[in-house]
Amino acid sequence: MVKEETANKRNFFTLLLIFFSILGPGIVTGSVDNDAGGITTYSVAGALYGYKLLWTLIPSLIILLVVQEMNARMGIVTGKGLADLIRENFGVKITFVIFLGLVIADIGNTATEFAGVAGSLNIFGISKYISVPLVAIAVWLLVVYGNYRLAERVFLVFSFCLLSYVVSAILAKPEWHEIGSSLLRPTMHLNKGYLSMVLGIVGTTVAPWMQFYMQSAVIEKGIKIEEYKFAVWDVVIGCVATIVVAFFIIVACAATLNKNGIVINEAKDAAVSLKPFAGAFASELFAFGLFVASVFSAAILPLATAFYVCEAFGFEAGINKKLKEAPQFYALFTSIITIAIGIILIPNAPLIAITIWSQVLNAMLLPIVIMSMIIIVNNKRIMGKFVNNGFQNIVGWSTTIILIALTIMLLMAPILQRFLK
Amino acid sequence: MANVIGADLKARAAAMFVNFSGLLNKDVLDAGRRIIGKMWDISAKMSEVYPKSDELIIRKGFFKRVYASVPFSTVSEIEEEIVLSLKSEDIKFLPASKEYEFLLRRDILDQQVVDTYNRKVIRVNDIHLLRIDHELMVAHVDIGLRGLVRRLGWEKAVDFCVRFLKGNANYLKKDDWVSWKYIQPVAVNSAGMTMKLSVSQKQLSSIPAADLGEIMRDLNFNQRMALFMALEIRTKAKIFENLEFEDQKAILEELDKKEAAQVITHMSSDEATDLLGKLPRNTVENILTLMSSDRAKKLSTLLGYSSDSAGGLMITEYVSMSAAMSVEAAIEYIKNQTREFETVPYIYIVDATHRLIGVTNVRKLLFADPKDAITNTVFPATIYVHLNDSVKEVAHLMEKYKISALPVVDENKVLHGIITMDDILSQVISIAWRKRPRKPKGM
């Protein structure tokens, strides 16, 4: 009897161990991906266009899969971060352009994260002038003095809360046949709002800084080429989880807000507006998920950005270094946070515009990053026999071309509209 | 006046140095001054302290890139353009450039290198080449912000702005150049996964193993492995002692078993035991069978003790001698037997069954009558610990009696090894610092 119990216990723990060892870079990256900016973009897309934009998640998933698999492979084979590889293969000028774009986009993204913090805590009656500075200080202290790795793991467990969106969506009783038909019959409109929304969704789902994050995570995990197959599974699970969460956020907002013609500007509005249609529980779940995601990404984004910039330009970097040893690193990290909260704390700041446009900037930066990745990943000297195959190159290049085309269309939309009329 | 001469010297010195980044993509002309392509790279001979230019690699075409290489001696002019003394008919372009061992653009510019002087990994922003007749010599690498700004093509504008804001800014005066003699490239040859060690290998081995271990943490795995393989066995073992277990394991997996056994043989016995204790059983057995039987026996005995007991902490490198020896013979014995030892804090006197009788030290022996028996030189009290005593007890005894090494005995008082202050200190530090986060590699 007793023996059986211990055997059961051991089984349970081995399973748990296997489960946690599978929880790899892909899943971490996936959960970072659904940050406040992502949740906002998906909510606004759902509220504004209903189920119409659901189809964008399918190409997003394919792009995400192909790009992250490349990242995993590059990390495993070279042991180098993406910032390293870009600097080493393209020199200073291209690196500078990429990172200038990345820093600007990430300041916008970080601002969005703090907007998420402000919004979600506002639901609990806390003013943004209190919550944002407090969370910012907490994040800063955590990174500079605390044990950041442990915090990352805690956040990861919390990120399971993102699954609360699935519950929220089902509570909202969506029309499944409409969802099906919008997935099968994509629609395209040539107006600025629609185009920027499409680009925004792609840009937030496949954010450029994530490629850098993903590759570092793979290296840190010390995955070997023999374990490549597992790494691919990890990527697949992470990507699918990301897209599933995104799907349910759009569905939740489409089924309630769009149906009733409610216009929202922030993810917080979505949480509030959900209440009358899906109940207080769904609304609170939505707000809680938003808070966790925001704090998590508000810590990771500025840190990661500062780290990659320093990596590329050869400045001392790393949270184990003291302030004096890595001044550029800490200066960059601190200024990204400071500028971001500055933007948020300006009264009547156009939060929704900042969110959508930083996602659009992401989408514009993305083709440049993907192009660099494809060139590096096809270099035999760097990748040996693990260069891209034909399929990967086709998806990679077509993603790049489509994104460039969408970006041009977005910029030209006002002209095109007049021309078509 | 002095200023003028200074400026003149400076100008001449500047003319002698060429920035490698300034040469990149310059037009290359043939003897008839027709453009034949753009300068792509320079190959260098690593045989001397400062590598010398060997061949110039030219690239042309955009969609269909072709490369040609010419001996550097045919370069007749390096100014606005690079002019060759060859006719363009004599230059053959091929779809791929030759295999080179060492290229400046590929292996140094924008890459990471080890600065053996400041003992850290740095990224190269530019290379300073010294002009000597028709050759270029690698003199410095530029790791400063200014080199970065120059690469962006904004040197003049940024200089102007900085001068405007603060005339005596450090930025304008201080150049972050590191002499090539301190530079160890870490570009890994993808074919053999080996690293070309520069002549400054001597510099590399002059770095204390602890610092070298730190440097290795900043390199990626392939570079780390290649650098490790290039070192000599003693340095390897020392570095190994300074690595975290995860890194040790990763390197061990890449080494062949024989090499692994060799490295572990050269480690101190307590560090080696620590490492073996964490490895899977069959790996340990594999490694032990490849060692000398003496060493293997010692290590497998040590492996039997719990890692935080006196038995697990002790080392087996100590001096013991029989009670029958005279002082004279003892000194002679120490001279002959302990060349390899770092220090000889104490000498342990044992009987025929290796039971501990007394403890003495070199100082006592030197001041004693050479004809006297060594048993007359022992300390009045023999302080020792048992195999199963805890770290705490050992540390406590050391502190109480102010002894830098304690003998470890079993229940029959048979001497098995000693514990030094160092071993205890590292234990105490690791307990005190346990809460400190490990340095993450990715960030």
Image (spheres, rainbow, N blue to C red):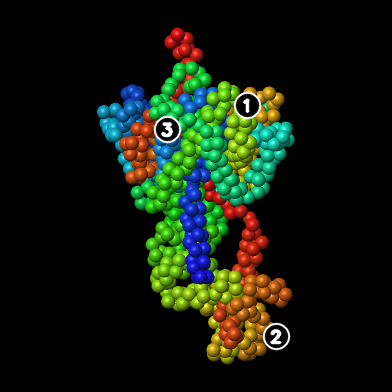
Rate crowding at label 2 as few (under 14), some (14 to 19) or many (20 or more) other CA atoms within 10 Å: few
Q: Is residue B261 visible?
A: no
Please say if the residues under marks 3 and 2 sit with CB atoms less than 8 Å apart: no
Kindly indicate whether the residues beneath marks 3 and 1 are on one polypeptide chain. Answer: yes
Residue at x 42%, y 32% (from the top left corner): A58
Give the image location of residue B402, x and y in percent: 71, 74
Q: Secondary structure at mark 3?
A: helix
- For the residues labelled 2 and 1, the Cα–Cα distance comes to 81 Å
Q: Is residue B424 visible?
A: yes
The foreground one among B290 and A401 is A401
Residue B101: quadrant of the picture = top left
Kindly indicate whether the residues beneath marks 2 and 1 are on one polypeptide chain. Answer: no
Give the image location of residue B72, x and y in percent: 36, 37
Residue B252: quadrant of the picture = bottom left
Give the image location of residue A64, x and y in percent: 44, 36
Q: Secondary structure at mark 2?
A: loop
- For the residues labelled 3 and 1, the Cα–Cα distance comes to 28 Å
**As shown in the figure, which amino acid type bears the numbered disc 2?**
Pro
Position of the C terminus of chain A, as image quadrant, is top left
Q: Is residue B40 above or below residue B256?
A: above
Subunit ID for the residue under disc 2: B
**As shown in the figure, which amino acid type bears the numbered disc 1?**
Leu
Subunit ID for the residue under disc 3: A
Kindly indicate whether the residues beneath marks 3 and 2 are on one polypeptide chain. Answer: no
Residue, disc 1: A351
Residue B348: quadrant of the picture = bottom right
